[in-house]
Every structure is written in structure tokens, then in C-alpha cells.
Image: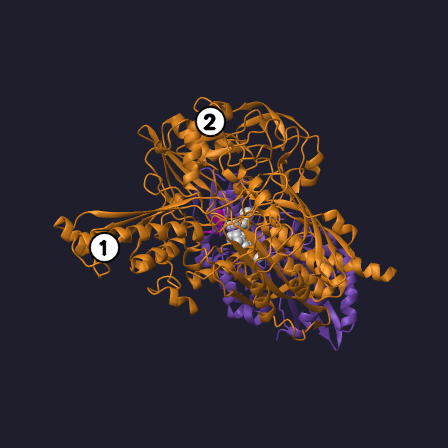
């Protein structure tokens, strides 16, 4: 492989088996769920049964009277410890337990503490709350103009630099409106040969990590120790310290392996509640959600996207207007960042002179929405890549050819004005076309089984500016430990980070010890999210390794070695201290350059440290009698720079694609007046082994991220991007009907076929 | 979930005795695969469970009857039915359907008694056993009785099991000469509950359909026999035109219901397609010898 020449030690670029694999498959890996502390109480949450209302009363007496119940706590009780118990990364809008108002069905209203979790659950059923019901709003487009206002007061958090400008709009449900203006889009429409306008909808879905959310807080001297299944230990510490008015060092956050995260366990979730409860009762308190309770905790944004394009008769897109409405649910969580970071990529990976984007984060009375693998990108790609095919078909152009005419190429400006570099949009498109054998004749099936194929390509910017810090400790025998707050939630970050350090230090990956997040020990990291760790933490680890290496070299010279001469680190320590003693500590801290978008125009000359490029091609089969769809072939391709570990990259690609596959074909949170009607895995179906397409290919496109650690960048989300529109495009190719709402169920295909037939009958 | 007792009877008489108190909190527990879900969701909170698995030694038989039929004890696990050579010979449709019934972990513990008693219309065994002409064997305070599987279900999770009664097994008449098939379709994940399940049994005599039973599950509120579809088949040639007439009659007749897996209207259309396909498959499957 060609990257070997820049990686002489061969640690990076090698398919090292996951360091934790054996522990996990033999059932020895420890998870927060397994953790029991002496004197620990279990918490069970009592939840709102109405979507929007003022709390009139909460009667906890029957619950408190149950034998074995330690205490029942309401939101008002929390104020004894924290006067304003509101948290959140973008707005401090979410109370640890409802205060004054409830804003969605399933919102935590009170909590029962007991030594036996089953007793806590029994008692929680006995709590009775009364409410004065308020008008509610559920739809993101209606939320723009609704007189039902979810939050009377807006409380911007001001935590993250990229959200500093966030203020929200009082007396509306708009938490953030992001806009971008480039060129003159009206003029482009006025002079266009063709104008196309379509609307696309995505549904609300859930992350469904195998390990549901769980947090445990324990008083610890004059501080607090929090064990939590979190993707962002550093943020949890900062946010808990803020709530308590403490210095950060009184809060210790520990995170073991996670049983999946996908964005569900980001920022702060259950931690504020268990922290306050533990201080209140002076005992450890654990809250373990059930799979079903996760539906009320965090979800993926439902979204409406109106897209309009000006196109020349040769098929060049000259102008594009995007209006995107994000259904953020009752609390902002990180929705405003989704709105902005994804928002500016809404026109797609295309070279378009005139662009206008309006992207709105909206509050509604649904369960909150936040980050989910892809961070808003799949909702956008769903629209713009369906739109691409609709334009191409109308103009009689081949869909691949149409994309070739329009894609953003090296050095060209993106809508924000940032010049594209290290972004193999073309490479991804051509790889898919090649693997699909696009130019060859295609078997279209026979009888009631019709075959079709479709593709979609997309890109994503990294979240910026964010910081990662790493500490490397070399022991006196020459072995190395790596302290980082990156969370290994199944994506194999331990392995990848150990590979980087091993490469720098000339050690074997398997011999590096990765210390799991413990904020007393591991330094700051913004969070494990948005495919940022490989790039950001990867650089920090590289820098820390180089720092340690430099010190070893200096030590060697000071001990009389010739500069550049080979040495074994253990000999240096022995020589210096006269025995096996001492340490060398290397530190690396990394933050990329970034230019904030100008608030009025959304423009920036440096909007992202790197681009993730991904695409998918599918071949499908439709049973026209039932609408049933079978995906026969799923081909994913991505530009992830040079792969640090090709095997792990492949599993990230297939895993991401299959996750989006479920969101495309059947996952759907169904609501009736704000009430979730399929809130269990018996009725909310995720893909199983029998759903997996018979052929899946995952391709690493030939590329190198020149600014990345060892040429690498993130890959955890890239294969989610193209799946939905590729399938919709293939459905159209097979049977000539166009679906614009997810999920693409057999029933919706069947109904579209019927409608097309009766249309044809009339004509 | 509250604390509860679990008792292990050593005979049907003892099990019936434990049930006789009429206490809502006392209930039969066979494999627990359905019951535990109801307990977990708070739908049912028992005080005492009667573990019928304890009767396995005497009540998990699967045997051919003298007349060429089949007798299966209530405590037989679904996997033992699946693996039984007797079943494979005299009612192969059952063994085939098992492969796609839940998963091997569920089949290893779920038992025929529980699979019949639960009464969820999405379940696979009831339509199949009904199409084969099966009878539920019951015992209770007033002695033993039987009830045809096809009329055992009265509503969603409701059956003709009376208070204090237990299912001891199921009996099938001789299958020689019958051609059977069961086809189910899911509209979400492949391992979802079916959206429609159709079971048919046909007897073709001298090129004409002499007899037919057609059962639909999942799409309707309870297991339903489609008699007008059966009538449309009778004496017709076993061909596509006859099957299509039966399918249209089935779609006319069945009262389908809305659910998260599809609208009633869509399920009716699926039923139309699947009655046709299941009949064709039964024909292909050939007659039991
Ligand atoms: C993950 C999963 C997937 C599934 N998928 C399918 C599927 O694809 N197809 C399908 O058909 N089914 C499916 N099932 C359902 C499964 O078939 C039933 O749960 C099972 O058949 C019930 O049998 P059991 O012995 O476990 O009953 P239990 O759970 O023990 O009992 C069920 C009910 O029957 C009563 N009962 C039990 N035995 C008797 C008796 N002898 N007399 C009177 N009452 C009795 C109990 O009191 C209880 O009310 C699935 C279940 C699970 C958990």
C-alpha cells in the first residue's frame, strides 16, 4: 500500500485488531451498567403524560409510603441544592426535573429513590401530577408561526465559541436562525432555463445504543464522583461544576467503555439529576434508563427541507435556495449547532455561484432532538440528492453525468467561500460509478419484480473550533501510557490512538496502555462526536508523543549519547536515576484554525479543518404487487484521508450505512398529539441480521488529508450520508415513483404506485 | 416488577388446584417469553406463577395418533416440535414455519401451550394449526374438553380458555391428502411481527379443489377463517384464476385493522396478494402422504 512509505514503523496503516476485542467478547469489559457502590440508591423517573402544561400539583405521598422507598424528589426540591437546575450545551433550558412547566410527554417530573430498583419503579407509578394544559405544537413548520410558545424565556449558554452569537428569538420557537447569502440567487432564478422546487421530510428516530443511558453519582469528600456512560466527560465536569458553583477539580467524571453512543450520550443527559440527588441524600445514586425511556431522552431531528434550484439547459446549477426547518423538540440540546453546521452544507457538494440558505432550529412539544451519527447531514442529503436526480431525470441527463457537471472540485469555493482542499468528491462519485458498473446495461427485472439503481454523494464539515489534549507517560522501563478523554464507544478509538502513539514512539500498538476518561487524570477533550477524534485527538496524541520523544532524545544527549544515536529508553532512566525510576511526560494540545461565519452572510474563508466525503450506490428490487423493497447491493465509498486502520475503517463504513438504512426503510417514532405510540423495540423496528443486503462493499477512496495526523481524518459518519436518497433514487429508477418522505415503507411505495396508475388511467 | 412466587406442580391436577382460587395474580407460566414482557412493561403483576415447564417429563410428547393424526403436549418446546421427525412427516408446514418463528432462543424455551394460550393475533402457530384442522385440548375444574383452534380466539389476547382452565395439548386430524402452506410478510424489519400471515390447507381430488381451509392472522384483530374465500375455491381447478377469485373474496371478507406496521387498507391489499401466493405455494408443496 502506498501509505507505507510515509509510515516507516508500520503501526499506522495496519489493521491492528481492536485492543479491547477479547475483553468484550469474553464478557470481561466493565460498563457503568454493571457498577454497584455500597449504599447506592436506585432512581426511577416519573414522567409527564401531557405534551405542554403548567404543573399544578405533584402528589408523591403514596409513592413515599411504599416500604423501601428512601425519598421522592420533585423539581422544586432540587432547588435546595441548585437554585437554577437548568443545563444544556447551547441553551441552559433543560431542568433536571420539570419546573413550573412540562414541555413534552415523557419529560422527567419527579424521581423515586430506593435501594431496590423494582421498588423504585413500583412507587413511581403511584405519583400523581395535575397540570393546566397549554396549547402544544409538534410540527417544525407550524412551530415557525405557532402561538404555542414552548419556552417563555430563552437562556443562551455561551459555552462554545461557535455558538457565541446564539440568542434565540423571544416569543417565538426559534432557537437559532442561521443564514447564508452568496451571490444573487434571485437573479439566478430570474435568468434560469429551468427552475425546480421540492420539499422533503425526514422523520424523528432514535439512536438505540445497546447500552441504554446510565449515570451514577457519589459524594466523594467535599467533591462528587460521577460514573457515567457519556461521550463527553470533560463537558459533564464543566457543566456540573457550573451548576454547583464549584471549581472543576471538585467534580470527577469517569467513563468506561460505552455500549454504543451515536450522539445519544453527548454533552449532559442524566448527570445533572444524579449529581444533585447524590448531594441531597448524601449517598450514591444511580439512574439506569430502560431502552424505552430513551425515546423520551434524546432523538434525531425530524426535518423539513424546501430546496429550489436554477438550472441551465446544459444541466449546470446556477442558483439554489434552501430553507431547512429542524424539529428540535422541547429542549435545544445541541440542535442549534446541527442547524448551523449542517445548515451551511445544505446546497450539497456542488459548485453553485448563487446560494441562499435559511436554517431554523425550532422548539416543539416533542422529545428533544440532538446529535445523531451524521449530525443533520443525512436529513439534508436526503433532500438535495433526491432533488439532484429529479432535475437530472427531467432534463434527460444521466444522474452520474449530472453530478459530474456540478460537483465542487479541488480549489473551488464552497458556498461559505472556503476553498475546497483534500475533498475527494469526484473520487467518491467515480468509485461508486465504477463499482456499480454504471455505464453497462442494467437488468431491470421482469414480471412484478422490477429492479433499479441509484446513487448519492455528500459531504460534511467538521465541528470547529474544538480542542483536544493528550498526556503520554513513559515509565522507567520504557513502556507508555496514554491518558485521553476520548471515549471508546465501539468505534475503536483506543486502538487508533494507540497506533498513532506507537508510530511516534517506535513501540508496538499492543503495548500501549490507553487510560480511559477520568477527569482527575485524563486531560480535556471537547467530546467524542462528529468524527472529530481521529483528527483532533489524533494530532494531540501525535504532539504528546513527539514531546515525549524530544525529551528522551535530550536526556540521551545529556547522558553522553551522540545526537541521533539509538538508545533504549529504559537504559536512559537507569543511567540517570541509578535504578528503574522516574518518568517522562509528554503533552500535546491541538486546536485547528477557524474563521467564524459572518452572522449576516454566513461566509467564512476557513469554515472547517477538514471535509468528510461519503456516498452510496444501491441496486434494489421492488415487488410491484406489495411495494416490498429489497436492497440487493449496497456500495459505500468515502474519503477519510489515509486509513489509520483499514479494517476498523471498513466496519465504520458498513456500520454507519446500516444505521442509516434502518432510518431510511422503517425506523419511525410515531406520535399521536405528542404521545409516542410505538415506544418499544417490539414496535419500533431497527434492522437485524436478516435485513442486511446480500452484497455490501466499503471503499476507501485514494486520498490523503494533508493537514491530518498521518494523512488521516474522521470516518464514523461518512457512510450515513448517501443511503436514503440512493434508495429513493433507485425506487424511482425501478418503478418511476418519487417518494419525498422518510421512511420509504412498502406501503408508501405501494400507494405511490397506485396513484401513478390512476394518474396514467386518467391521462 | 414486584416480588412473586413461582411454584412447580408435578401433575395437571396439582396445577389446576393451584389455579382454582380464582386469584387474578395467579397464572400459568410456560416458557415465559410472552409473560415476562407483560410483566416488564407493567401490564401484568403476578403474585404467583405456576411453572408448567415442571410437567415437561410427562407432557412434552409429540406423537402420531392411531388414525394418522398428531398429538402434541402443551409442555413441548417449539424447538422440539421443529426438530420432530413425526411433525416433519405428517405436518411439514409446521416445521417449516418454525424456522421463521421468533428466533432460536425463544423457540428453545417457548412451549406449545403458551403459544396457543397467549392469543396475540400476530403469532404464527394458531393460523397454521387452525388450517390443519387442529383442536386445543383443555382441562379444568369441570374436566376435559376440546375446542377447534379456529374458534379458540375471541379477541386481542382473548381466548375461550375459562377461568381455572389449562391447555394440555393440541390434536391434529390425519393430514394425508392435504396440501398446506403458511406465508407471512413483514413490512418493517425482517424479524418483525408479521403484518399479514396466511395459512391454507387444500385437498385436490381429480383436478378440482375438494376442500380448503384459509386462515388469516396478524392483519385482523383475531385469528379469522376466510369462509367466502374457501367457497370461491371449492370445486374450482387449482389454478391462478381460481386463486385470484379466492384472493378477492378474502380481501372482501377480512376485517383488517390499522397498526404501526400498516394501514387497514394496505393490509387488505397485502392479504389479496398473499392469499394467492400461499395457495400457489400449497399446491407446489404437494400432498402429505
Ligand atoms: C423476541 C420475540 C420474538 C417473537 N417472535 C415471534 C414470531 O415471529 N412468531 C410467533 O408466533 N411468536 C413470536 N413470539 C412470541 C412467542 O411465540 C410467544 O411468546 C411464545 O409462543 C409464548 O410461549 P411461552 O411458553 O413462552 O408462554 P408464556 O409466556 O409462558 O405464557 C404466555 C401466556 O399463556 C398462558 N399460558 C401458558 N401456558 C399455558 C397453558 N398450558 N394453559 C393455559 N395458559 C397458558 C400464560 O399464563 C400467559 O398468559 C416472539 C416472542 C419474542 C419474545
- Dominant SS of magenta comes to helix
State the mark number for residue B159: none
* Residue behind mark 1: A478
Task: Tell me if the residue at label 2 has its CB under 8 Å from ligand 1.
Answer: no
Could you say whether the residue bearing mark 2 is in a helix, strand or loop? strand
Q: Is residue B138 visible?
A: no
Q: Which chain is purple?
A: B
Q: Residues within 10 Å of mark 1 (few under 14, many from 20)?
A: some
Specify whether residue B125 is painted magenta.
Answer: no
Residue occupying image coordinates x 64% and y 71%? A438
Image color mode: by chain
Percent across and percent down for residue A395 are 76, 63
Q: Is residue A691 visible?
A: yes
Q: Nearer the viewer, mark 2 or mark 1?
A: 1
Which of the marked residues, 2 or 1, is nearer the chain's N terminus? Answer: 2
Percent across and percent down for residue A35 are 36, 42
Residue A529 vertical position relative to residue A242 in the rendered view, above or below: below
Q: Is residue A581 left or right of residue B180?
A: left
How many numbered markers are drawn? 2
Magenta stretch, residue numbers: B11-15
Q: Nearer the viewer, residue A619 or A715?
A: A715
Cβ atoms at labels 2 and 1 below 8 Å apart: no
Percent across and percent down for residue B120 are 61, 51
Q: Residue furthest bottom?
A: B206
Could you say whether the residue bearing mark 1 is in a helix, strand or loop? loop
Q: Nearer the viewer, residue A477 or A556?
A: A556
Can you tell which quarter of the image residue B270 is in? bottom right
* Residue behind mark 2: A72
Q: Nearer the viewer, residue A507 or B120?
A: A507
Q: Is residue B14 left or right of residue B229?
A: left
Q: Is residue A339 left or right of residue B45?
A: right
> Looking at the rendering, in which quadrant would you find the N terminus of chain A?
bottom left
Amino acid at each position: 500500500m502506498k501509505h507505507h512509505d510515509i509510515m516507516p514503523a508500520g503501526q499506522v496503516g495496519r489493521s491492528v485488531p481492536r485492543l479491547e476485542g477479547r475483553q468484550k467478547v469474553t464478557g470481561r469489559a466493565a460498563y457503568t451498567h454493571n457498577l454497584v457502590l455500597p449504599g447506592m440508591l436506585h432512581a426511577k423517573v416519573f414522567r409527564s403524560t401531557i405534551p405542554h402544561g403548567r404543573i399544578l400539583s405533584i402528589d408523591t405521598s403514596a409513592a413515599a409510603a411504599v416500604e423501601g422507598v428512601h425519598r421522592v424528589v420533585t423539581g422544586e426540591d432540587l432547588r435546595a441544592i441548585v437554585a437554577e437546575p437548568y443545563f444544556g450545551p447551547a441553551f441552559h433550558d433543560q431542568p433536571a426535573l420539570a419546573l413550573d412547566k412540562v414541555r413534552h410527554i415523557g419529560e422527567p417530573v419527579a424521581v423515586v429513590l430506593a435501594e431496590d430498583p423494582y421498588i423504585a419503579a413500583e412507587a413511581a407509578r403511584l405519583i400523581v401530577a395535575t397540570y393546566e394544559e397549554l396549547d402544544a405544537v409538534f410540527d417544525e413548520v407550524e412551530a415557525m408561526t405557532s402561538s404555542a410558545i414552548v419556552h417563555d424565556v430563552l437562556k443562551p449558554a455561551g459555552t462554545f465559541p461557535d455558538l457565541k452569537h446564539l440568542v434565540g428569538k423571544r416569543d417565538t420557537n426559534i432557537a437559532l436562525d442561521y443564514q447564508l447569502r452568496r451571490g444573487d440567487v434571485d437573479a439566478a432564478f430570474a435568468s434560469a432555463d429551468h427552475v425546480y422546487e421540492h420539499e422533503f421530510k425526514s422523520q424523528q428516530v432514535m439512536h438505540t445504543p445497546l447500552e441504554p443511558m446510565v449515570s451514577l453519582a457519589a459524594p466523594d469528600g467535599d467533591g462528587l464522583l460521577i460514573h457515567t456512560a457519556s461521550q463527553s466527560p470533560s463537558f459533564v465536569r464543566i457543566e456540573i461544576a457550573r451548576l454547583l458553583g464549584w471549581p472543576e477539580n471538585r467534580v470527577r467524571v469517569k467513563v468506561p467503555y460505552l455500549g454504543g453512543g451515536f450522539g445519544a450520550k453527548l454533552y449532559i443527559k442524566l448527570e445533572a439529576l444524579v449529581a444533585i440527588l447524590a448531594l441531597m441524600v448524601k449517598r450514591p445514586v444511580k439512574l439506569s434508563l430502560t431502552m424505552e425511556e430513551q425515546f423520551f431522552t434524546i432523538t434525531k431531528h425530524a426535518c423539513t427541507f424546501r430546496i429550489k434550484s436554477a438550472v441551465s439547459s446544459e444541466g449546470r446549477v446556477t442558483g439554489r435556495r434552501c430553507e431547512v426547518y429542524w424539529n428540535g423538540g422541547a429542549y435545544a440540546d445541541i440542535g442549534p449547532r446541527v442547524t448551523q453546521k449542517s445548515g451551511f452544507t445544505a446546497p450539497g457538494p456542488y459548485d453553485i455561484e448563487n446560494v441562499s440558505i435559511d436554517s431554523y432550529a425550532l422548539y416543539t412539544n416533542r422529545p428533544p432532538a440532538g446529535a445523531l451519527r451524521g449530525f443533520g447531514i443525512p436529513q439534508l442529503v436526503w433532500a438535495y440528492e433526491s432533488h439532484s436526480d429529479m432535475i437530472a431525470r427531467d432534463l434527460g441527463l444521466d444522474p452520474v453525468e449530472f453530478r459530474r457537471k456540478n460537483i465542487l472540485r479541488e480549489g473551488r469555493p464552497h458556498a461559505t467561500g472556503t476553498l475546497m482542499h483534500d475533498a475527494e468528491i469526484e473520487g467518491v462519485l467515480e468509485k461508486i460509478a465504477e463499482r456499480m458498473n454504471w455505464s453497462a446495461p442494467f437488468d431491470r427485472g421482469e414480471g412484478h419484480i422490477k429492479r433499479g439503481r441509484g446513487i448519492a454523494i455528500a459531504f460534511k464539515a467538521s465541528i470547529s473550533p474544538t480542542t483536544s489534549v493528550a498526556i503520554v507517560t513513559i515509565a522507567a522501563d520504557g513502556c507508555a501510557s496514554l491518558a485521553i478523554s476520548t471515549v471508546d464507544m465501539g468505534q475503536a478509538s483506543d486502538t487508533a490512538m494507540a497506533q498513532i502513539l506507537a508510530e511516534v514512539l517506535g513501540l508496538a500498538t499492543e503495548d500501549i496502555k490507553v487510560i480511559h476518561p477520568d477527569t482527575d487524570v485524563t486531560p480535556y477533550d471537547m467530546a467524542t462526536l462528529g468524527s472529530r477524534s481521529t483528527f483532533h485527538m489524533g494530532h494531540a496524541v501525535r504532539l504528546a508523543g513527539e514531546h515525549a520523544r524530544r525529551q528522551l532524545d535530550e536526556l540521551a544527549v545529556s547522558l553522553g549519547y551522540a545526537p541521533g544515536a539509538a538508545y533504549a529508553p529504559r537504559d536512559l532512566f537507569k543511567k540517570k536515576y541509578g535504578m528503574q525510576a522516574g518518568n517522562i511526560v509528554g503533552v500535546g494540545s491541538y486546536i485547528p484554525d477557524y474563521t467564524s461565519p459572518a452572522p449576516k452572510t454566513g461566509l467564512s474563508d476557513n469554515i472547517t479543518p477538514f471535509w468528510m466525503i461519503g456516498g452510496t450506490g444501491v441496486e434494489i428490487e421492488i415487488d410491484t404487487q406489495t411495494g416490498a423493497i429489497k436492497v440487493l447491493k449496497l456500495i459505500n465509498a468515502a474519503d477519510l484521508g489515509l486509513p489509520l486502520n483499514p479494517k476498523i475503517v471498513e466496519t465504520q463504513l458498513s456500520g454507519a450505512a446500516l444505521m442509516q438504512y434502518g432510518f431510511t426503510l422503517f425506523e419511525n417514532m410515531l406520535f399521536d398529539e405528542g404521545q409516542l405510540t410505538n415506544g418499544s423495540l417490539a414496535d419500533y423496528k431497527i434492522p437485524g441480521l436478516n435485513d442486511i443486503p446480500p452484497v455490501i462493499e466499503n471503499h476507501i477512496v485514494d486520498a490523503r488529508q494533508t493537514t491530518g495526523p498521518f494523512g488521516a481524518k474522521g470516518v464514523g459518519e461518512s457512510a450515513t450520508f448517501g443511503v436514503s436518497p440512493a434508495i429513493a433514487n433507485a425506487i424511482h429508477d425501478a418503478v418511476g415513483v418519487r417518494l419525498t418522505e422518510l421512511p420509504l415503507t412498502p406501503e408508501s411505495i405501494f400507494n405511490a404506485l397506485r396513484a401513478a396508475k390512476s394518474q396514467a388511467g386518467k391521462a | 416488577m414486584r416480588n412473586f412466587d413461582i411454584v412447580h406442580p408435578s401433575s395437571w391436577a396439582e396445577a389446576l388446584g393451584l389455579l382454582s382460587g380464582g386469584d387474578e395474580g395467579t397464572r400459568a407460566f410456560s416458557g415465559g417469553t410472552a409473560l415476562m414482557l407483560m410483566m416488564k412493561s407493567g401490564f401484568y403483576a403476578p403474585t404467583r406463577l405456576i411453572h408448567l415447564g415442571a410437567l415437561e417429563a410427562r407432557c412434552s410428547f409429540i406423537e402420531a395418533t392411531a388414525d394418522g393424526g398428531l398429538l402434541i403436549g402443551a409442555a413441548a418446546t417449539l424447538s422440539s416440535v421443529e426438530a420432530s421427525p413425526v411433525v416433519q412427516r405428517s405436518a411439514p408446514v409446521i416445521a417449516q414455519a418454525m424456522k421463521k418463528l421468533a428466533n432460536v432462543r425463544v423457540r428453545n424455551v417457548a412451549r406449545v401451550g403458551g403459544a396457543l394460550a397467549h392469543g396475540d393475533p400476530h403469532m404464527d402457530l394458531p393460523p397454521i394449526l387452525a388450517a390443519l384442522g387442529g383442536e386445543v385440548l383443555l382441562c379444568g375444574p369441570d374436566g376435559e374438553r376440546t375446542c377447534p383452534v379456529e374458534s379458540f380466539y375471541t379477541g386481542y389476547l382473548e381466548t375461550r380458555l375459562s377461568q381455572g382452565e389449562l391447555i394440555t395439548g393440541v390434536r391434529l386430524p390425519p393430514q394425508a391428502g392435504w396440501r398446506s402452506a403458511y406465508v407471512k410478510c413483514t413490512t418493517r424489519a425482517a424479524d418483525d411481527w408479521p403484518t399479514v400471515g396466511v395459512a391454507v390447507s387444500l385437498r385436490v381430488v381429480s383436478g378440482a379443489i375438494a376442500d380448503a381451509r384459509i386462515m388469516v392472522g396478524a392483519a385482523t384483530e383475531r385469528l379469522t377463517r376466510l369462509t367466502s374465500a374457501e367457497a370461491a375455491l371449492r370445486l374450482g381447478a387449482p389454478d391462478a384464476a381460481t386463486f385470484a377469485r379466492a384472493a378477492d373474496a378474502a380481501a372482501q371478507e377480512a376485517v383488517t385493522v390499522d397498526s404501526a406496521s400498516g394501514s387497514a387498507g394496505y393490509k387488505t391489499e397485502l392479504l389479496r396478494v398473499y392469499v394467492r401466493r400461499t395457495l400457489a405455494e400449497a399446491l407446489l408443496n404437494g400432498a402429505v402422504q
